[in-house]
Image: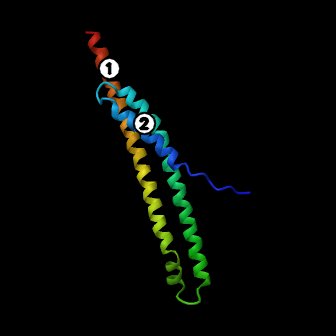
Amino acid sequence: MNQPKQDWTETHLFEIIKYQKQLDLLPHDGMEIARIELLSKMLIFIGKLSAEFSEQYKRVYARRKSAHAEAYLAATNNKAARAELAVAELREEEAVAYGNYKRWGNAFESTREEINALKYKVKISIEDGSSRRGS
């Protein structure tokens, strides 16, 4: 017995917003480690949201391909045109799903890059601090 898949979009988005609000309260300088920690936690939910939208996109794609094939087989003439007309609405739904998937995939990549930049900044700060103490 197949149960409908639970949509976690709202839950993941809530968590991302929660961490973003915490980040907004932190000063940009001197709080790099705290920012890394919050961004890392947020990255988990950005990744989950990206995966959720990827799955939604693939599901719409599969429905479109199936509907196209069914319409093509059912048509008596102008098969390709009738099949394309039959899936026009699904193409729009697919475009929205693809946009969401790409948007959150990009957010994942840029958040990961921000974390790496902060880690590098912390590393440089540690090296600078340790080299001054030795002088």
Q: Nearer the viewer, mark 2 or mark 1?
A: 2
State how many labels appear. 2
Residue receiving disc 2: 19
Which quadrant of the figure contains the C terminus?
A: top left
Task: Give the answer, above or below, for where 3 lies relative to 126.
Answer: below
Q: Name the one closer to the observer, 82 or 125.
A: 82
100 left or right, relative to 131: right
Q: Quadrant of residue 32?
A: top left
The secondary structure type at the circle numbered 2 is helix
Q: Check if mark 2's residue and mark 1's residue have beta carbons within 8 Å.
A: no
Residue under the point 44% across and 62% down: 96
How would you rate the neighbour count of disc 1 (Cα within 10 Å): few for under 14, some for 14-19, many for 20 or more? Answer: few
Q: Quadrant of residue 73?
A: bottom right
Tell me which numbered mark, 2 or 1, is placed earlier along the sequence: 2
Residue receiving disc 1: 127
Q: Quadrant of residue 65?
A: bottom right
Percent of width and height locating residue 79: 54, 85
The amino acid pointed to by label 1 is Glu
Task: Give the answer, above or below, for where 4 lies relative to 20.
Answer: below
